Image (cartoon, rainbow, N blue to C red):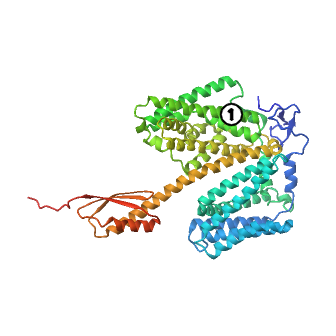
Amino acid sequence: MTDDPGITHDNGDDPTGELEPVTVVEDVTASDDAIGEAGDPSTAQKLEAKLRRPGSLAALVTQGLVGAAILFLLAADPYAFTSLEQMAGLAFVAFGLFEAISVTRRRAPLKHYLQPAAVVVAGVVLLLWPGRTVNVAGIVAAALLAFRGLLDIWAGLRRWYEEGSNSWVFVRGLIMLAVAAIAFLFPKAAISFAIVGMSAFTIARALIGVWWAASNRESLGSADPTDTFAIVTYWLSSKEMDAAEAEEVDARVFLHIGSLHDRVWRFAILMLLATVIATFGIATDSTAVVIGAMLVAPLMTPILGISAGLINGKSRSTVISATITGLGVGGAVFSAWALAATIPDLQTVMENSQVLSRTAPSLLDLAIAIAAGAAGAYGVSRADSSDALPGVAVAIALVPPLAVTGLALHAREFGQAQGAFLLFLTNFFSILLMAGLVFIIVGYGSWSRLYHRRNRIRVSFAAVVLGVIVISIPLGLTAKNVLQQASDLRTANSVVFEWLGEDTTLRVADVAISDHEVEVQLVGPDRPPPAVDLAQRIAEEAGRDVTVSVRWVPEREEVGRADR
């Protein structure tokens, strides 16, 4: 039984069982999970008509070659003549000019020229003063994004009850504000990411356009290879699963299909056992035991159910899956908190590797979660790929961060609890986002539903994207702090060796740096130079005031003795 009794797939007389794109038979008595719009031309037909227009393939391929050249130059030598800043300037100028031309064609009011003019000015500044203005360019881009985001938020609030798309405009404004915050925090990295992203996008567009032109050679004069969105949408609409396959996926990801009582009880028992295994595995610092907890934990199933419900506009299924997920998360944290009372030396446990590895997540954890989420959704949607799910469970590691959260709360280590729960949220939102994309790509769900309920669905997934972006901010700050500490440590080591001189008899045992404090441990027979000189040198290199403490351990110089 599916979640949508009002929709059936019509195979007609097709012996292969393949369906025409987005062909549906609709029941006027369908529930809220059904489509609700009837009589419209199919999405595929509209897209096919739209694609039968002439387009410039040569211009598209040229853009792709330019993007490939930029990526090649960056990979070969980031400090070449065509530097990162200069390429950013060229990109800004080109984008601004294209926007200005578009405004001119629309005959828009004069105020619409402000944004493209600002972008062009930023690009010119980068071209004239490369190497010194990339941070300024990133901040300017962040300011433009923030301004546009505020406009969208205002527009969404001002017309909230007038149009169905206002919620989408509002969430889009929030996304722009979140991206602007990241650009403000990491201006140089934002420019680098923008250049690489734009280059990769132009390459992808060119490849898609070439594929579309090659697939429609008989009508190349009328086909439009430049409408990338329409091409991708038409291709996806033709890959829709049949009813039997979709029902199989529904049964895997929706726990309320079948016996809700039995399936939820099994879920609760497995969650409890997984939490117990993970908690004691973390307490004993046993990686093998923690991996066992990952394999037992069933939490990924309702999370995939949330994503499947969102992508199909199934409100009831989404709410049920979200409720089960929330109860499972809360139960895992509470169980770990209660089990912490049985651990005799909890403070020592909070310092072992299993805890520390899950309390300071970074962008690498986000990348891992994104890849694992995509693999999990693909494994669920393809029966012949289900063998990969145990590996996905190990990679995504949903329950161990929750166990660490409960342990940290019991030990009153709220900073560690926050870091561990942030790791769980990273995994959670990454699964939602990538699972939704994979479900679309493999053809799960009805493309007509995606089209007719596009406002609700895009708002839902825009909120997921917003969650991923917001989570990226603390993850990026963590990565930035780690990189900054590594850079400061290298600088301090270099300055210490210069301060001692080449002829020193002292040996550097350790150099530790944290914020504004530097600790140096020296061993040797000679007294070290004054620490004031070292503090001045490190402050000059680091660009901030530092306090230096030098610990010297006298050691008599070994003198060779003759054999007796």
Residue marked by disc 1 = 321
**With 463 as the anchor, is 358 left or right in this view?**
left
> Could you tell me which residue is drawn at 87 percent across and 57 percent down?
52
Whole-percent x, y for residue 41 in the image: 89, 45
Mark yes or no: residue 548 visible.
yes
Whole-percent x, y for residue 102 in the image: 81, 66
Q: Residue furthest right?
A: 39
**With 43 as the anchor, is 316 left or right in this view?**
left
Mark yes or no: residue 199 visible.
no
Q: Can you say which quadrant of the picture contains the C terminus?
A: bottom left
Identify residue type, mark 1. Answer: Ser
Q: Nearer the viewer, residue 471 or 557?
A: 471
Q: Nearer the viewer, residue 530 or 468?
A: 530
**With 76 as the anchor, is 247 left or right in this view?**
right
Q: How many marks?
A: 1
Dividing the picture into quarters, in which one does residue 203 lie? Answer: bottom right
Mark 1 crowdedness (10 Å alpha carbons): few <14, some 14-19, many ≥20: many
Q: Nearer the viewer, residue 243 or 229?
A: 229
**With 340 as the anchor, is 206 left or right in this view?**
right
> Could you tell me which residue is drawn at 74 percent across and 70 percent down?
117
Dividing the picture into quarters, in which one does residue 497 lie? Answer: bottom left
> Could you tell me which residue is drawn at 66 percent across and 60 percent down?
197
Say which element carries label 1. Answer: helix
Q: Residue furthest bottom?
A: 128
Whole-percent x, y for residue 49 in the image: 88, 53
Q: Can you say which quadrant of the picture contains the N terminus?
A: top right
Q: Nearer the viewer, residue 533 or 73?
A: 533
Whole-percent x, y for residue 488 in the image: 45, 61
